[in-house]
Image (spheres, coloured by chain):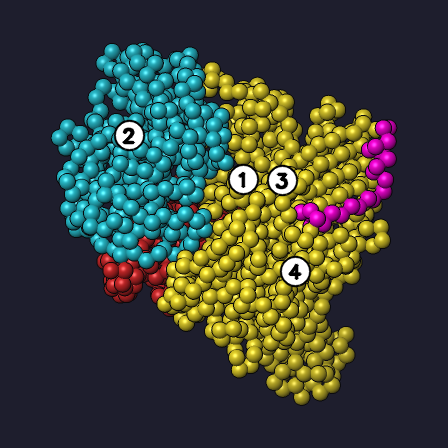
Chain colours: A yellow, B cyan, C red
Amino acid sequence: MAEPALHRKEDRRLLTGRGRYLADLVRPGTAHVALLRSPLAHARIRAIDVAAAAAHPGVLAVVTQADLEGHVQRLHHHLPMLPGLRQLHWPLLADGKVRFAGEPVVAVVATSRAVAEDAADLVRLDLEPLPPLTSIDEALADGAPLVYDDWTDNVLLRLEVAHGDAASAIDGGTHPVLRRRIVHHRVTGAPLEGHGALADHDPGTGRLTLHASSQSPHFLRTVVAEALGMPESRLRVVAPDIGGAFGNKGHYLREEILIAALARRLDRPVVWSQDRIEGMTAGIHSRQQVHDIEIAHRPDGRIVAMRAHLRADLGSAELYALGMAPAFATAGTLPSVYDIQDYAFVVEGVVTNKAPSGGYRGYGQPQAVLSMERIVDLLADQLGLDPMFVRRANLIPDGVRPYVTAGGSRLDVGPLSEQLDELLAAGGYDELRKRQAAERAAGRLVGIGVGQMVETTAANPHALAGQFGGYEMATVTVHPDGHVSAMVGTTSHGQGHETVYAKLVADTLTVSPDVVDVREGDTDAVAYGAGTWGSRSAVMGGGALLLAAERVRAKMIAFAADMLHQPAEAVTLSDGALRAGDVVLPLSMVANLATLHAFAAPSVEPGLSASAVFEPGNTQAFPDEQGKLNMAATHSSGAGLALVEVDAATGRVRVREATILHDCGRIIDRIIVEGQIQGGFAQGLGAVLLEAVEYGPDGAPLVRTLQDYPMPTTREVPVVRVLHQETPSELPGGFRGMGESAAILAPAMIANAVHDALRPLGVPIAQSDLRPPAVRDLLRAGGVGLDLDALAQGALAELPDGRT
Amino acid sequence: MLGAPCRIHNPLFNYAASRIVGGPERVDQRWQRFVKPAAFDYVAASDVPAAVRALAASPGARALAGGQALLPLVNQRAVRPTLLVDLGRIDGLDRVEIRGGTLHVGATARLRALQAHPLLRTHAPAVAEAAGLVGPVHVRNRATLGGSLAHADPAAEVPAALLAARAMVRIVGSDGERTCPVDELVVGAHRTALGHGELVVAVELPLATDRLGGAFREFAVRTGDLPLIGVASQVRIGEDGRCVGATAVACGVADRPRPLAAPQALHGAASLSAAALRDVAAAVGAELDPVSDARASADYRRELTQVLTIEALVGAWRMAAGS
Amino acid sequence: MTAPRAVQLTVNGRPVEVVLEPRELLVDTLRDRLGLTGAHVGCGHGSCGACAVLVDGVGARACLVLTVQLEGAQVTTVEGVLPAGSGPDGGDDLHPVQVALSRCHGLQCGFCTPGVVLTAAELLAEQPCPDERTVRERLAGQLCRCTGYAGMVEAVLAVAAETAGSDRERAGDG
């Protein structure tokens, strides 16, 4: 078989501009929606005057929450069983109050987006301003205004969990205790394609088709059907080509449900295409947490116990699935790769008058790993020990597997200390230390940062979403012409599923991947899938497809056996043919017969199609009585090393080199895996060195355009050296989840490296915001002023590269 | 007056009456932005008098040059012109030539052409370098010198470089032509002294005398972005090898390009010493009263200006000494 | 008048007449009227490069051009990087940059890809053998959230190396 010129099956259409993203699906006659959004962060709605807007030529409807009452159910978190969770039921459009700048208030439907905006401009909102809360401190202060008038404070949920006995160790006075606050700032996933939804309702059949740029079409269908009070059997949700998602498209948006409601109301296709400013200001933000961490330790650096108070700045809590869920993941994974069994935490979700906070690649794990790595570094510094020594002293021991963490996660990963050894060897750690010494002697602030992580992959979302499961469904059909349809309930947003899945199925059926067509992201194609998030697709989608393909393989063999009057054991499938003794039946012939001339094998059922449900059965839907929960069907692991240089004068951090050693079990496509690591690293780099979502004191979003939110370009991201380990999981295929690891590791690697760079100056790092002004602020506060003499001399000598 | 405090960060948020053409215009006070422009009329002017007439006739008219600064604001409805007068078809308005003892650069000259233009590199090297920093390249392909100047973004490179290069701005209006220096044209954040119906048609730069060097150095979180701070510098070295002029102008530190007085201390110096540079940088720190906002504190802006002044002066001096 | 007026231009080699309001952006004309949805709107304010097209042979952001400005202009989109039907079986051929991007995995979700293809093709037409620094500079305006750029840069350098190699061959043969 000749090597294909292109690497992925999806590449040709994407390269030639023939991808079909949500906005590309719009046909003439579709109505467009523009949303009028609250200009204030916190206000009572006194009146909404839509008369002029409704009268504007080209306007088909102007809709407020009042128009939706009785037609659309309020949304909720589906977690009535979670003690202490404030039960919220929120509307699609703001009702009575607006609680963040950008909250949608009025939907204008018109013949074009421009006309809809013309009309939106004419809507008059009469708002009575209320004091806005833009930080956790403000929201928790005594006498703070209440975001919800019927709450007693601004806390959505306060959860207190204790594993083992951390309190005795920390409060008992027998161990020294290190206490630090680590601050994580607000960022946003910002996929290049914004959200979007296009809905079409057929009044005759009552069927509604909703195209949505969504990671989980089946979950979205369930949510929309519930909200609209319509049968799921008449609702189809389809994900088109998706221009990036990263967890940012893993929630079920008010706007998506609204579009479905409007299509049903207007009997005309309706589209909403989230523009960049909407996405930046009224989309989903992520990661803003404050961690107050205490560790009891021994003088030799061994951590004995940990206690953490985690506060998440949720912004608006009106987001399903629960926007606080990543904070649970942070709390659950904070011990990271370290052996800490006595671990207690309090996690609080605080509502503020900002856009909703939700998932973004890593889903709370980046914050856990960064904080834990900071704590280890700070402990080492305090004790005057080599940080590498302290890491190793605390690393989860090699050997016993699964290692059950304090929180109940069953870590089935390979040996971590060996992994660390291999990373350090392959990354040239010792050589880098020598180079660092030389550069330091020359006055340069060069730092080496090492980080390691274990990652929850292929998770069971039930505990966080109050419904849904982590299982996956697939159907494989061999058509009479020998082509194969492989349908599965995941979605692709760049991960190359069409290629990866085709290879898996093709290998099982011994055909060329060229004849396997993969279809995902369509509720009509598969009964119920969970979508793509949490690094689950290779494991769960791959697992389900392997099972289904195996069943089809067995049917083929049974058919051929019956045809040939042979026992099934005498028939093999290899190289695209069914073989028994000297008889060779090409697979395409058997496929043709099995469907079109099935009488040829009268004892077996016709057709070559099989479905499978893959449920690994090793995860739990809820924590048990001790609060322990294993959420992941399997785990991945990885270690990374970064070399950075800090410019003391400007605070700019440049990542000069990075190496990541990664274990995602059995690899299906090495190049695709490396692409995920490169891309994840870039996002992690951006999240600490370039990006921040900020608000003014009045709650107005300051980050609105891409000029305000500088994401990494070709000039900021080094090429990461990627190395692989393949420790197979126990699941079908031996896969482990893949996709988020570099995004989880990179912030910690880089923060560790910056801390190392600034060690000689005695400026520790205890925050995720390492943009130039922030680093310069830390230096200034640490007494490091501008050395004008050195700067002048340096400028007159060779200018360092890339200063400007 | 030393840099008046203002919010330069996020000009959209406090976008006042920015004008390429004077006259009242409805400004959107709400923060919400859209993605498709409000309706406007459009005319492609055939020559400058026609452009002036069209601008003067409509209170809400604006000139459209490259559109790279204006159209993002128009798309978002932050700016709502009623008429756009396209200057792009006016023959010769982009000309770069020596004329009457000065270097004449037409208002619609594209920044991409200017960054490599030999005349500009010879007579106004800081301006050429500044033009090349307006990024990325596809924006530079269409963005114009006149447009950047008239947009008067406090953090923009081109106005600061033009000020450092002692450019005179040629303006045409219904009452005729006038010329003024850059710092009389740019009077605040996105504010110019253009009257209603007036149009920037060219800048005039002095021809290089002595040995001229120029440099532009900036700091942005990402290379190619609008900088936090930029410093344009020009240095002239006389026949005897001594400095006869050293200027530096900073952008991003105030609501308009901010000339720095400190480099004057280099006049008469036979060489550029580390000590002299250090003293200039220290004096820059003392003379500045930078704005403070969410993007950067006053301290940070001050420090960056000091660092970039050193670099820009060195770059300009080196070029002058080498020429 | 804000009323629609006719504009005549050439798109991917074909003459086109559209009647539109002055406020209509080139990217919307291409996508909505001409069905050329390869140019994508990633931001609408010229900061991402996903809408990159060539106007009179020179790279531009289609969200920062009004179609009314383009009377008589030539516009090239990703769909026109090579003439349609110029492939071996009358199908569509691929530009070397497109092939290289795939082989080097320089695309994932594909949303930025048409802009990258056009920008890289434009660069290689100007400079057949750019070095890595030049490639990164030229592509710096094309935001990608998926790939981390390694495969993208590698792809352009691979095409440059191909060109250098075949130039050397030709020179050797001569």
Magenta-drawn stretch contains C51: no
- Proximity of marks 2 and 1: CB atoms separated by less than 8 Å: no
Q: State the residue at coordinates (52%, 56%).
A: A46
Magenta-drawn stretch contains A167: yes
Q: Earlier in the sequence, mark 3 or mark 1?
A: 3
Residue B231 higher or lower than A330, as above or below: above
SS type, badge 3: helix
- Which quadrant: the N terminus of chain B? top left
CA distance separating discs 3 and 1? 11 Å
User: Camera-side residue: A745 or B44?
Assistant: B44
Identify residue for label 4: A89
Please identify, in this view, whether the residue under mark 2 or under mark 4 is nearer the observer. 4
CA distance separating discs 4 and 1? 28 Å
Q: Position of residue C172 (x, y in %)?
A: 35, 44
User: Which numbered circle lies on residue A224?
Assistant: none
User: Camera-side residue: A306 or A744?
Assistant: A306
> How many residues crowd around disc 4 within 10 Å: few (fewer than 14), some, or many (20 or more)?
few
SS type, badge 1: loop
Q: Position of residue B203 (x, y in %)?
A: 22, 34
